[in-house]
Image: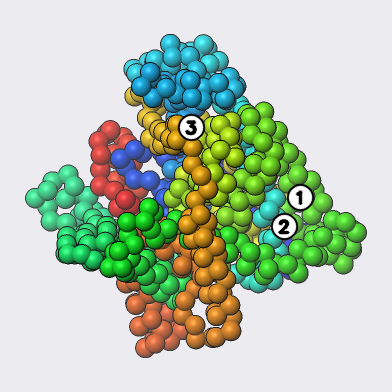
């Protein structure tokens, strides 16, 4: 549906973009300084962003009420609040646990921690260009030691080149995601009308009708339940004599000590109110599939131990099967979008006037041009770093296939987690081709590209598409929202670099996950790996199972197993959330069975309140911890 001229600039106003830009800086600082205080970007909905929108919405309601009594009409509109939400979500993704929080510590790591024992200097230092890493140990001393200041010109100058090149590389990567989302937006948002469960809370929270979520008693009941639990658990963390109510994981492994049951491994159970709330908006077949396939993987381990095949390295190849499953989800998404993509092709190559792209963030021709320019930048960057062109194309082809699968899954099903730990192209290509074929220069670059492949939890691409869906729901101009997104990408990237450097020169640099890719690189170069045939078979098996599950789902209306549940159930985060998803799915099934759709709709504010209560109180504990520099209760991990 085409927007009217009065709607075209609604929402993504310059004041909304300005407020979002200003709020990005403290938010990325919050994320990068929150070690030990919780990790917002490890689930699909970020509690730091919801906290900011909650405070803005509350202040906005007060401002609008005061201005009305004075005969004025001040305050932010819903579209403006959602523009700020989208900007903060994208910037938080870039600063988060699996993007810049990994990259920035990696930039100097290989040179500061090089020793005669690990022999990194001889193994791979010669493959690292000067513009890609900071190499001078004398310059890095104060960075790792701390107790000084970043604000010296010689210090700033020392980081300038690497910050600019890596920041530009990341901006190009994310802009390419914007282009992909622009090509599929109309099909997934307007034609298929996917449900986008993750956006329900910000959409309802910012609503400005008389039935606003903040005036709903049912919401405040859920808010009170979740908030009270977090307050009690927070006090227990500070004063152990205060009783707690959950707030931690209970491992079932000690109850299974005899073979083959001992093969079950770490199996925690816990009920997190926010996870119960998020899972309530997931379709029942997916929520059922999440915990069913989680238990299926456990059963596979037990059966393998009973049959004596657990001794096979990496059995049962859950990572490889998940990798194949995500590629299967990508193929399914492309097949579902093929007719729309054909129309896009007609507009690009024939300028078919019957294909309307006037409401798109960019015209389809400009979008494809932006995609190609971004890809060319990525190829040139990686080629200058020593990668082969065919390796670059395969690597980023896999990466964007997985990214598109994650985005489609979020749009359709609203999965609360999708971490894919250590199964990106940097891990899978050596297993497929072997390390000798790839060569030392490609493998060295794989180490640096680890930063956006360590896990896919805080991925920016789903938030971009969800932003376009919010625009469609509230009349925000897609073109103006595109400007807000680009501002968020640039400011979020370089504000994250600043925040990390600022903190490091005060407290000493935090290495976080920087060591893993270089230790992995060392092992590859010292002991080259042949192609892993069982792993490749497992990838193909995961792909085939996903396609089979989708086929059965399309042919049999009663089929309860969803292919996305198979893909995400083996992830690390599912260990933490599977029981919460189980509880939520049972509650939803009971509500629908005995109360019907009307009861389900009436209880939606209750479950939104569970999310909001835990996010707001948890955010307060996190901010207190950062302020007093003392670990506080973490409701998330």
x and y, in percent, of residue 68 in the image = 53, 56
Q: Which residue is mark 1?
A: 367
Q: Residues within 10 Å of mark 2 (few under 14, many from 20)?
A: many
Instruction: List x then y, in percent, for residue 226.
Output: 29, 61
| Nearest to N terminus: mark 3 or mark 2 | 2
Compared with residue 482, is residue 227 higher up or lower down, i.e. above or below?
below
Residue plotted at (22% across, 62% down)? 262
Q: If the image is split into quadrants, where does the N terminus sit?
A: bottom right
Of all residues shown, which one is farthest toward the bottom? 594
Query: Which secondary structure lies at badge 1?
Result: helix
Nearer to us in this view, 461 or 301: 301
Is residue 427 or residue 195 the one in the foreground?
427
Q: Quadrant of residue 493?
A: top right
Labels 2 and 1 touching (C-beta < 8 A): yes
Which mark lies nearer to you, 3 or 2? 3
Mark 2 sits on what residue? 183
Q: Secondary structure at mark 3?
A: helix
Query: Can residue 84 be seen in this snapshot?
Result: no
Left or right side of 410 for 185: right
| Lateral position of residue 235 relative to residue 347, left or right | left
Residue shown at 39%/24% (left/top)? 118
The residue pinned by badge 3 equals 525
């Amino acid at each position: 549906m085409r927007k009217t001229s009065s709607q075209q600039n609604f929402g993504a106003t310059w004041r909304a973009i300005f407020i979002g830009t200003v709020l990005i800086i403290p938010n990325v600082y919050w994320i990068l300084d929150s070690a030990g205080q919780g990790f917002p970007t490890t689930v699909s909905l970020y509690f730091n962003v919801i906290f900011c929108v909650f405070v803005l919405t509350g202040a906005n309601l007060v401002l609008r009420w005061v201005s009305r009594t004075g005969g004025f009409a001040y305050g932010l509109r819903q579209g403006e609040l959602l523009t700020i939400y989208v900007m903060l979500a994208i910037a938080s993704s870039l600063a988060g646990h699996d993007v810049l929080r990994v990259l920035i510590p990696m930039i100097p790591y290989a040179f500061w921690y090089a020793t005669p024992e690990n022999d990194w200097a001889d193994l791979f230092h010669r493959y690292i260009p000067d513009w890609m890493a900071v190499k001078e140990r004398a310059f890095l001393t104060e960075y790792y030691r701390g107790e000084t200041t970043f604000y010296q010109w010689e210090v700033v100058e020392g980081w300038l080149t690497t910050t600019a090149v890596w920041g530009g590389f990341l901006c190009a990567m994310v802009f390419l995601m914007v282009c992909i989302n622009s090509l599929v937006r109309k099909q997934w948002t307007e034609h298929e009308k996917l449900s986008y469960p993750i956006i329900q809370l910000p959409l309802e929270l910012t609503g400005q009708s008389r039935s606003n979520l903040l005036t709903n008693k049912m919401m405040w009941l859920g808010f009170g339940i979740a908030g009270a639990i977090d307050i009690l658990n927070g006090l227990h963390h500070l004063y152990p004599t205060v009783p707690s109510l959950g707030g931690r994981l209970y491992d079932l492994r000690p109850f299974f000590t005899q073979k083959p049951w001992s093969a079950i491994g770490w199996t925690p159970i816990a009920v997190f109110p926010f996870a119960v709330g998020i899972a309530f908006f997931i379709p029942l077949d997916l929520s059922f599939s999440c915990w069913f396939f989680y238990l299926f993987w456990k059963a596979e381990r037990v059966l393998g131990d009973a049959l004596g095949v657990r001794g096979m390295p990496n059995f049962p190849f859950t990572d490889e099967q998940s990798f194949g499953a995500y590629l299967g989800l990508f193929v399914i998404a492309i097949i579902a979008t093929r007719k729309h993509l054909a129309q896009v092709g007609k507009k690009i190559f024939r300028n078919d006037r019957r294909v309307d792209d006037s409401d798109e963030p960019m015209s389809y021709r400009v979008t494809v041009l932006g995609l190609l320019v971004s890809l060319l930048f990525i190829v040139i960057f990686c080629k200058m770093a020593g990668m082969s062109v065919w390796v670059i194309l395969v690597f980023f082809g896999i990466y964007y296939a997985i990214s598109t699968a994650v985005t489609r899954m979020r749009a359709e099903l609203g999965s609360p987690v999708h971490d894919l730990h250590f199964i990106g192209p940097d891990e899978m290509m050596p297993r497929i081709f072997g390390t000798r074929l790839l060569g030392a220069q490609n493998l060295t670059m794989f180490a640096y590209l680890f930063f956006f492949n360590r896990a896919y939890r805080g991925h920016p691409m789903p938030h971009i598409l969800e932003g376009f869906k919010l625009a469609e729901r509230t009349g925000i101009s897609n073109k103006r929202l595109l400007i807000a997104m680009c501002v968020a990408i640039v400011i979020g990237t370089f504000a994250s670099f600043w925040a990390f450097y600022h903190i490091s020169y005060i407290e000493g640099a935090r290495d976080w996950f920087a060591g893993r890719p270089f230790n992995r690189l060392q092992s590859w170069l010292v002991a080259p790996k042949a192609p892993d045939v069982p792993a490749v078979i497992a990838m193909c098996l995961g792909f085939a199972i996903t396609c089979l599950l989708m086929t059965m789902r399309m042919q049999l209306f009663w089929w309860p197993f969803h292919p996305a549940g198979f893909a995400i159930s083996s992830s690390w985060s599912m260990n933490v959330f599977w029981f919460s998803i189980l509880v939520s799915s049972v509650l939803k099934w009971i509500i629908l069975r005995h109360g019907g759709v009307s009861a389900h709709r009436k209880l939606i504010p209750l479950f939104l309140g569970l999310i909001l209560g835990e996010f707001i109180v948890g955010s307060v504990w996190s901010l207190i911890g950062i302020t007093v520099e003392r670990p506080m209760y973490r409701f998330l991990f």
